[in-house]
């Protein structure tokens, strides 16, 4: 009878959810989302990020193992603005089967004045580049975790409150250091158009060689126009991205050099993916701190080499 009872208990747990005291299983599509979930859920959840560091989510093709991870999760979080385009069908199927699936940008999508889009009406998914905007994702994640496990509501609320305070500090730092760049040099040129929210929030003129998605191709005319702009405005640096090919950015550098205007690559920015796990840059706060500090120093502003917390380049 004891053996039969044990088998019945195991069957019940597999069929209807996790065993008592077992951690909630959470799947997040990208690191920026997974890191927020980890901060809010704390020790009450095991968070699995599907798309890893230095991987472009626009081009990522989900595997059978990814589908299995979604199936095993108690709850799923994704961007919700076509960032993970090729995962869309999988997420729809999971939702139809009753799996809790949440778009972390759902609050922002209700604010038409906030969301950016292209001339073709494609929504810009890169909301995390504006720290104040990304706080809306914290709200969605907090509410969803509480709905999933109401017994831990106070714990989730306390974690979310503490994390918001850290994000407010990051927002102030980003605004301060980017504001120190000489006004005529506040031009951010990158591989693709992932930094428009950052530009609007912190006063940068952002120019991406490619469009919102890295699936788009940059034309020769686009590159020529950017070269002329860089030369005419004497912009000192352009930037590559960790998850995007640098060939177009290097073409800009060569084109400017041919016109006797030396432009350097100011460094590598995190756009659609964070840094390596186990590093400060492998957290959302570290990612934005790295970007803001690097951009500031390359364009002539003032920022400490170690960033907001003195942790850039250091292991956690």
Image (cartoon, grey):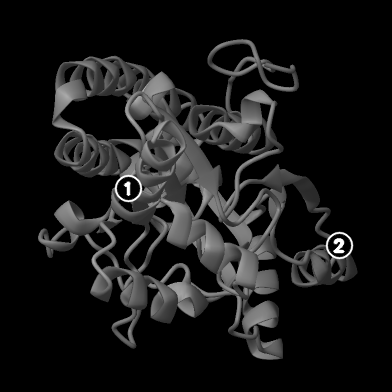
Q: Would residue 167 appear left or right of 293 to someone viewing this image?
A: left
Residue that carries the numbered disc 1 in the rendered image: 12
Judge whether residue 121 can be spotted in this image. yes
How far, Cα to Cα, is label 1 from label 2?
A: 72 Å
**Residue in the picture at 62% in, 75% down:** 61
> Residue 280: x, y in percent?
64, 24
Local crowd size for mark 2, using a 10 Å CA cut-off: few (<14), some (14–19), many (≥20):
few
Local crowd size for mark 1, using a 10 Å CA cut-off: few (<14), some (14–19), many (≥20):
few
> Residue 23: x, y in percent?
41, 30
**Residue in the picture at 68% in, 34% down:** 277
Could you tell me which quadrant the N terminus lies in?
Answer: top left
Residue that carries the numbered disc 2 in the rendered image: 260
Q: Nearer the viewer, residue 239 or 27?
A: 27
Indicate the quadrant where residue 162 lies.
top left
Q: Nearer the viewer, residue 243 or 300?
A: 243
Secondary element at image label 2: loop
């Amino acid at each position: 009878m004891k053996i039969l009872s044990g088998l019945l208990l195991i069957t019940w747990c597999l069929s209807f959810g996790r065993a008592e005291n077992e951690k909630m299983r959470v799947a997040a599509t990208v690191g920026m989302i997974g890191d927020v979930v980890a901060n809010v859920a704390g020790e009450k959840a095991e968070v699995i990020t599907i798309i890893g560091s230095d991987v472009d989510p626009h081009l990522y093709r989900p595997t059978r193992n990814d589908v299995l991870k979604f199936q095993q999760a108690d709850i799923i979080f994704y961007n919700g603005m076509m960032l993970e385009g090729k995962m869309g069908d999988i997420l729809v199927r999971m939702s139809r089967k009753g799996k809790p699936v949440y778009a972390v940008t759902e609050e922002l999508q209700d604010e038409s004045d906030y969301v950016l889009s292209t001339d073709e009406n494609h929504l810009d998914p890169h909301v995390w580049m504006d720290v104040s905007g990304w706080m809306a994702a914290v709200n969605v994640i907090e509410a969803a975790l509480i709905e999933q496990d109401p017994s831990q509501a106070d714990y989730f609320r306390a974690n979310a409150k503490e994390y918001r305070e850290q994000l407010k500090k990051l927002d102030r730092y980003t605004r301060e250091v980017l504001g120190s760049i000489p006004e005529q040099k506040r031009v951010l040129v990158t591989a693709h158009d992932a930094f428009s929210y950052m530009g609007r929030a912190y006063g940068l003129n952002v120019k991406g060689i490619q469009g919102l998605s890295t699936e788009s191709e940059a034309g020769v005319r686009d590159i020529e126009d950017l070269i002329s702009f860089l030369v005419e405005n004497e912009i000192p640096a352009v930037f590559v991205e960790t998850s995007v090919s640098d060939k177009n950015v290097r073409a800009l550098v060569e084109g400017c050099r041919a016109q006797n205007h030396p432009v350097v690559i100011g460094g590598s920015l995190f756009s659609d993916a964070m840094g390596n796990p186990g590093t400060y840059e492998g957290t959302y706060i570290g990612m934005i701190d790295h970007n803001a500090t690097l951009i500031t120093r390359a364009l002539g502003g003032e920022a400490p080499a170690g960033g907001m917390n003195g942790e850039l380049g250091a292991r956690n």
